Amino acid sequence: MSSGKLARSTHSEFFTWSPDLDPADYLFVTYRVAAACDVEDAASGMAMEQSAATVSIPGFVDAGTLSGWTIRVRSIRTAAPSQERVVPPYSISTDVYPGQGAGSETRERWDIELGFPLRLLMGRPSQLLNVLVGELPRLGFLTSFRLIECTLPSSFGPGPAFGVPGIRAKLGNPLGPLLCRSMRPAVGLDTATMARLNREVLIGGFHLVKDDELACFPDSTAFRAHVQAMVRARDEARERSGEPKLYIANLICEPEEVETRWDMACRLGADAVLVAPFIQGLGLIRRLAQEVRLPILAHNTFSDLLTRHGGWGLSDASLCGWLRQLGADWFVTPGPFATPDYPSGAAQALLQAAFRPREGAKPIMPILQGGKNPEGLAGYRAAAGSSEFMLIVASWVDSHPDGLAAAARRFREAVEG
């Protein structure tokens, strides 16, 4: 609905949690917000905005008929003050915008827990961002908005078909973190040269290579030729090295191309695929995972727009948990992960979302990327709490004075040392 038609409800009981309600019928989501109005008004407005705000229309809708479709405010708690900047508020002529203060730079934050009727979501991944976020960020009285906690029920997906144990099994359960080279330069390089780069780094000791997310193919013929070339390079590296090697194919394409390219990747011998769930849709992960054919790398392209700002967006941990429940086998950690700039509490929450035991959901493997080198291994392990992660490395091996294969060998020795 439009916030321009939002009005203070005369039936507040339909938007307030009641002990008579069954928690099993609801998904509970916590938001950390700042508001330019009373926090109870803000919470009620959020609940109304994303559900059946109009609960009574004389002659058409009786009060209470839609009570099972309304979002309920379960709790409001004071959160720690924040130094994060807020966005300016705005006001429109509805009753939900009373008592705004002149100042918008408040440090006050509140954690608002809302109960969403599961019937609003209908078990559909496309409804997650549509219902749980939707038009909430456009509410003019919200000057800070962040979805900080939401654990999906098992009905939303099969969970990872392979997960950490399946990925490691495909590689013969190697020691230490996995090493993967993303195919760089991402664009403009001929296929034969890219295949040689892949072969060299795999022979040198890397476990995997992956298509870059920017790789784009004009048609299925070009995609087929690329996959075939990369699979041949992988096979040659397997033979030369005497150990398993994996190749991850790029499945970022138009909706009408997905089915054909997914089937090609499976039949032509790719070992996994990467998709862009925040561009292609969260439902794509579940659709592919249900077939239990290849592991799925949920790429982070675009998603940092949703997560990077501490006072606006969604938490990394929540999104990781969603990707895991839907069926992804890898996820990409935030850029500052494993550096002093990433808060320890956020890191712990992220790892919990990836690894905590959940029925039917294998652990999902974190990917660390961005300037990784052997000297940083101790820090990467400390941040991840184990060696159950994959490193994306290109620049360090590409620029090494001893050459690509020798550099890959030294990184592998450091990982296993």
Image: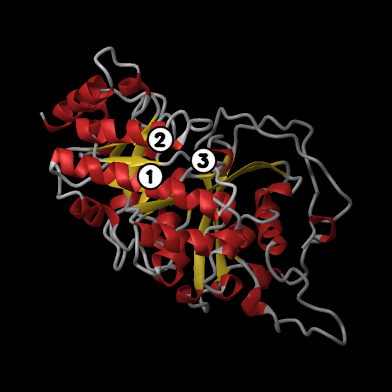
- Against 142, residue 376 (above or below) is above
**Residue 205 in view of the camera:** no
Mark on residue 192?
A: 2
Of the image marks 3 and 2, the number of the one nearer the N terminus: 2
Q: Quadrant of the C terminus?
A: top left
Residue 71, picture quadrant? bottom right
Q: Amino acid at mark 1?
A: Ala
Mark on residue 215?
A: 3
Dot 3 falls on a residue whose secondary structure is: loop
Q: Residue at x 55, y 50 (%)?
A: 278
Q: Nearer the viewer, residue 182 or 314?
A: 182
Q: Residues within 10 Å of mark 2 (few under 14, many from 20)?
A: few
Q: Amino acid at mark 3?
A: Ala
Q: Residue at x 52, y 77 (%)?
A: 21
Dot 2 falls on a residue whose secondary structure is: helix
Task: Estimate the x, y position of residue 330 in percent, counting from the top left.
Answer: 36, 49
Q: Residues within 10 Å of mark 1 (few under 14, many from 20)?
A: some
Dot 1 falls on a residue whose secondary structure is: helix
Q: Which residue is mark 1?
A: 229
CA–CA distance between discs 2 and 1? 7 Å
Q: Residue at x 34, y 59 (%)?
A: 294
- Against 93, residue 241 (above or below) is above
